[in-house]
Amino acid sequence: MKKWISRLIGNAEAGTNEGAGQDADGTAQARQAERTCAEIDAAYYRWLTASAGFNAPAELETSILDQVQGLCDSPGEAAELVPRVPEVIPRLLRSLRDEEVSVAELSRQVEQDVVLVAEVIREANSAYYRPLTAVKTVEAAIMMLGQNGLRMLLARIGFRPVIKMQSGGFLRRVAPQIWGQSEKCALAASLVAPGLTTGVFESYLAGLMQNVGLVVAFRLAERVCEPGKVPASSQFGVKLLACSRALSAAIARHWDFPQDVADAIAQAADPGESNLALALRQGDCIAKLRLLLDSGVLSADDNLISDALDSFQQRCLRKLCNVES
C-alpha cells in the first residue's frame, strides 16, 4: 500500500495554505458552519443506518468510540481491516509520474486490463466531460481526460475495493453508500479547490481517503453489536464520524500519504488556516447533502442546504447529480 501511495501522489502540485485570519464575524461564521456540518453529519448518519439502527446502551456506544480512538494509535492494525489496492493501478500511476510518457504508451498499458478499458472510456463519455461525439477508443479517452483526469480516475478505481467491496452483515449493505459519498466528496472537493487556492488532486485524494476510517469503525461495531445492527443515536453518529475521520488521517499517515492531505482529513471539522482542509469539509458537506436529496430525506428548498452552501457550492451540489458510483 505504501508503494502504491508513493506512486499515486507522484509529482502532483502541492496546494497553498494561504487561509486568512478571521475577525469576530468570521469566528461566528466558523462556529455556525461547524454546527451546520454537525447537523448534516447527524442527518447523514440517520440515513445511512436507518435499516440497522437500535437504541444501544450508553456503555456500548462508549466502548465502540473508545475502540475507534484506540486504533488511531495503531494505524497498521486498522489498515489490515480493509482490502488492498489492485496491482494494475500502481503500474499506471508510476507511468504517469513521467511527463514525457506518450498517450500511445498509456493506451497500451490501459488496454492490458479489460475492466480498466471500460472505465476509461466510460469516464470520457460521462456527463462531467460532455464530449460532442461519443469517445470509442482508449487513446481518445485518455486525450479527453488529460493527465490529471486520468490520475483521479485511477485513484478512484484503486480506492473502490478498499471502501465498497465489503462482505457480511451491515457493512456489506452500507458500503456502496459510503463509497458513493466518498466519490462525490472527492469530486466536490476538487471543484471547490481552485477557488480556495489549494491542490485539485490533493483535495480529490483527501475526499477518497476520509471514509476509510468509517469502514473500519463499522467493522469494529459489528463485532460488539447484534448481527446487522449499529447504534441509532444521532449524537453517537456525529461522534463516530469525527472519530473515524481521525482514524482515516492516522491510516493515511501510515500509508505515506502527503502530510498536508493527512492533516486536512484530521482538521476538516475545524480547518483553521488550512485551505485543503476547508476544501475537504466543503466537499464532504456537499456530497452528504446530495445523497440526502437523492434519497428524499431533504427537499431542494431545505434550509439546511441554504445554511450550509453558498451559490457556487450549490452549483457543485447540482453538478453531483450526474455522478454515478
Image (spheres, helix red, strand yellow):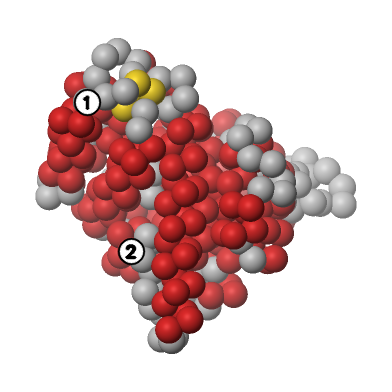
Which one is nearer the viewer's eye here, 123 or 263?
263
**In the shown orientation, is residue 293 left or right of residue 285?**
right
The residue where tag 2 is placed is: 267
- Residue 16 visible? The answer is no
Instruction: Tell me the kind of residue under disc 2.
Output: Gln
- 304 displayed left or right of 65: right
Q: CA distance from mark 1 to mark 2?
A: 30 Å
Q: Which mark is residue 57?
A: 1
Residue at image location 36% in from the left, 66% down from the top? 270
Residue at 26% across / 14% down in the picture? 226
**How crowded is the residue under tag 2: few (<14 C-alpha within 10 Å), some, or many (20+)?**
many
Visible in this render: residue 53? yes
How far from the left and from the top, in percent, is residue 1?
A: 28, 45
The residue that appears at 56% across and 43% down in the rendered structure is: 110
Q: Which quadrant would residue 267 be assigned to in this image? A: bottom left
User: Mark 1 or 2, which is nearer the eye?
Assistant: 1
Q: Seen from this angle, which residue lies furthest right?
A: 132
- Whether residue 195 is situated above or below residue 281 in the rendered picture: below
Q: Position of residue 295 (x, y in %)?
A: 63, 32
Q: Which residue occupies the foreground of this view, 243 or 143?
A: 243
| SS assignment at label 1 | loop
Q: Residue 162 or 153: which is nearer the viewer? A: 162
Q: Earlier in the sequence, mark 1 or mark 2?
A: 1
How many marks overall?
2
Please name whichever residue, 57 or 312, is drawn nearer the observer in this view of the structure: 57
Residue at left 43%, top 37%?
45
Q: Position of residue 57 (x, y in %)?
A: 22, 25
**Left or right position of 42 against 309:** left
Query: Which image quarter holds the C terminus?
Result: top right
- Circle 1: residue type: Pro
